[in-house]
Structures are given as C-alpha cells and as structure tokens.
Image (cartoon, rainbow, N blue to C red):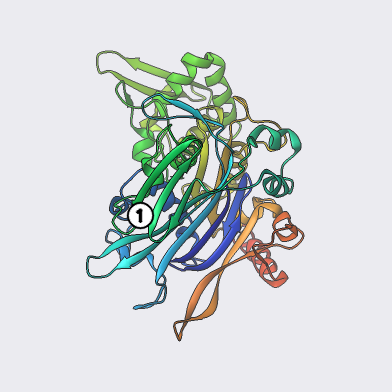
Amino acid sequence: MLTRLTVRGFKTLLDVDLAFGPFTCIVGDNAVGKSNLFDAIRFLHLLSKNPIPEAVASIREVRGRGAKPGDLFSSFGQLRVSDEVRLAAEMIVPAQVTDEFGVTGDASITTLRYEVAFALDREADRLVLKEESLSPVTLTRARKHLASWARPPFTESVLHGARRGGDFISTQQQTIHLHQDGHGGRKIPAAKSSRTVLSSVNADFPTALAARLEMESWNTLQLEPSAMRAPSMYSEPRRIDERGAYLAGALFRLEKTRGPKALAEIVNRVAALVPDVRELRVADDPRQETLTAEVMGADGAFRAARALSDGTLRFLVLATLVADPEATGTLCVEEPENGIHPDRVGDMVRLLYDLAVDCNDPIGEDNPLRQVLVNSHSPLVYNEVKRDDLVFLEFIDVVRSAARGRGAAVRVPGRTWRAKSTEPVHQSAAPARVSAWEQMTFRFRAADGQ
C-alpha cells in the first residue's frame, strides 16, 4: 500500500509530495499532470521488475511516440529545467514474502521508504542511476499517519516488526550497497547499472524483496472493451489484468475455490447497478479449451461477454475484483466515468470505494489490502467523492534555471485528514477553488436536465 509519494523533476511534477489513504481521488483540469502522477507510480512499478531502458519505453506515449529518457525530465517548452528525476515512495509491505523460486522470508519491518534518482546521459540518450535507497519508516511514525484515517484493528494488522540499524539499500560514493539482516550484502556501481538494485533481490534479502513485490502490485487499470470481451484460454492467467482481460478465467477460479456463492455475490452487485442482469455463469468449452463469461438478461437468454455493453462489462470486471481476495495491491484508475452513462457515474464511484480496503477492520481474505487511486476532471465524479478523499492538482507559475513556466501543485481541502496531518506535505486548497468545482458540478447537472 502506497502511503506517500514524492516526485521531483518528472514531467510537469517539478516538486510534488502527496499522502495517500485507502481511496484517493485526484481532480484537476486537462493536462495539469494527473496522468503524470500515475506515470510516476507506474514508473516505480516498472522499475521493480524491468531493466531501466524497458521501464522508460513502457511509459505511455509522448506526442504519439514511445517515451524517451529525455521526456521524463521537467521542461518549459523545449527548455529542460530539471537535471534529475527523483522519486520516493513510502509504503506498507507484506510481512512474509516468497520469491520466484518459492523461497519464503519474513520482512524485518513492514513500513519502508524507497527512493531512486536518475540523471540523463545526453550522448547515449539513457537514464543513469545516481542514487537508490530503501530505509525503514518507524512504526511510531507510521501509526501517526494511519491514525488519520484508519482504526486500530486495521493498523495493528498491517504494522509488524522493527528495525534497529541502518538502511536496507544505500548509496555511498556512487556505489549502491545492498544490506540485509545477517548478510554481507552486495556492492553495485550506480552509473553502470542497467537496472535498479531492488529489481534483482530475492528471498535472501526478504525486506527488500517485500518492497519489490509491493511495487510490482501497483497497476494502472485501463479497461479495454476488446480485452474484457475476449474468452479466456485454458493456458492463460486466472486473474484479471490491468486491461480487464481474463475475466472468464478469474470467474472460473473463484467458482472453483469459493463455490457458486462467489458468482452469486458478483451478479447481485452488478444487478443492483444494471437491472437487466439476472444470472452469471462461465461456459467451459473443452474442445476449444476456452472459458467464456455469460450473463442472463431479463428475457432469460444468456449472452456472452462479447455481446455485452461497455458499461456492463466495466461493472462486471470491477465487481469481480471486489469479490477476489487475490486481487490486492494499488489500482490506479484513470477517468472511471469513461464509457459510463452520467446517471451511473455515482454507481461506478461507489463500486470503486467497495474495491478499496475497509480501514475499520483488520486485513484478511474478506478484507484484502487493496488501495484505489482515481483521477478525473469530471464534476460528476468529484461530486460523488468524500471530501476527505479529494486531492486537487493545479498549475502554478514557477521559476527554474532562470526560466519561467508552469508546474503542477497539490492542494487539499481544508479540515480533512491531509490538511490536519501532523506531518504536513500539502498546501490547502483555496475555498474559491473548491467552490469553482462545486459550481461546475451544478452547471453540468443543470445542462444535463437533472
């Protein structure tokens, strides 16, 4: 679970520091940097499992082409105004981890801060790893943060261990040191490394592995109709991916492991949002070795996923994720209102709230540690989100390297837990700004005849 993110010199995010709870909605005008914030989270996710060049290439396209290293650095027009990209993430990690070889280990502490910094080699057009660190966050400090939005049963279920000593990863004189409990560790020349040190750790370094696996679980949910409609092959994964693919495979696994009640729970949730839905099943075709999700409508006929509307499919995918205890981690959801009738936007937001962990109860199979981050410029989405869960992103005028331009700044509504935090990292939103969004919501509804 991501609890705090600091971004410096990354695209429009010259200097952004943001605290997170189980559900956060980031609102702002087009092109202000909402997607860039998600790109920063995705970049950390990609770095946790890929070489640095592949992580760069996998970030979203820039002006119709694949991202290049120089595109990541803050600029005013053609003038680059940041010499480094620096990302820092504070997180809650699992207490026990298993690496790809099936070897398990216990993290020394479940609250960590990971930081990484890059410079640009202009001649080779590549990112150069300058600095990397992984350090413990004291449980006392973590409890203070969680106390703002979580109750003790939740807090005590996720905070474990203690760390007396130094960092797990540190950088000294351009050399990255990997330290771990009882191990001599490793030394890696930073500038020559083709990947982050964190991305290569195994169960010999369980706390670093816990951070790596946590970051691997941060995904951007970009539901694609073609992926949601496609049947699942026997050989394909049995978990829904970030495109909404493998829906039938996930439903098949849930039915086998949790019984028919799992599908009944899902269809009841969808039926409350789409009245035409009556029943849900998975058709198994051994000859084609495929699984197909089918929904029965009010007329009693079953229809395959390929015949369902985009909106129904989105609700079905999200309801399946809510019911799946294996669907954990952080989900970044961009513009959830897309493909949804305005009358159903509120239903979509409430479903996303259901997807997030209940911070009143301890984590477990019925309450998996799952976090939801949403961005939107829709007044309808804004109107459905609790005030405590809102964050504003807006442009401010800044001066860097003797040049004047605009960068994104975080604002939070007053009298919310972020505004009252004992460790303030945000500037409060001006009341006029909040009022402008409320007025926009009113005008939007009036224009829609509501």
Q: In the drawing, does residue 406 fall left or right of residue 154?
A: left
For image coordinates 31% across by 63% down, the residue present is 69
Q: Nearer the viewer, residue 284 or 306?
A: 284
| Figure quadrant of the C terminus | bottom right
Whether residue 303 can be seen here? no
| Figure quadrant of the N terminus | top right
Is 339 above or below relative to 324? below
For image coordinates 31% across by 60% down, the residue present is 67
For image coordinates 45% across by 23% down, the residue present is 251
Q: Quadrant of residue 434?
A: bottom right
The picture places residue 205, in percent across and down from the top left corner, at: 45, 36
Is 149 above or below relative to 28? above
Q: In the drawing, does residue 18 fall left or right of residue 388?
A: left
The picture places residue 26, in percent across and down from the top left corner, at: 57, 57
Q: In the drawing, does residue 208 fall left or right of residue 426?
A: left
Q: Residues within 10 Å of mark 1 (few under 14, many from 20)?
A: some
In the rendered image, the residue lying farthest to the left is 124
State the count of labels: 1
For image coordinates 62% across by 26% down, the residue present is 364
Helix, strand, or loop for circle 1? Answer: loop
The picture places residue 5, in percent across and down from the top left corner, at: 55, 55
Q: In the drawing, does residue 165 fall left or right of residue 252?
A: right
The residue beneath circle 1 is: 59
The three-letter code of the residue at mark 1 reads Ile
Whether residue 52 can be seen here? yes
Is 51 above or below relative to 431? above
Q: Nearer the viewer, residue 97 or 75?
A: 97
The picture places residue 232, in percent across and down from the top left corner, at: 34, 26
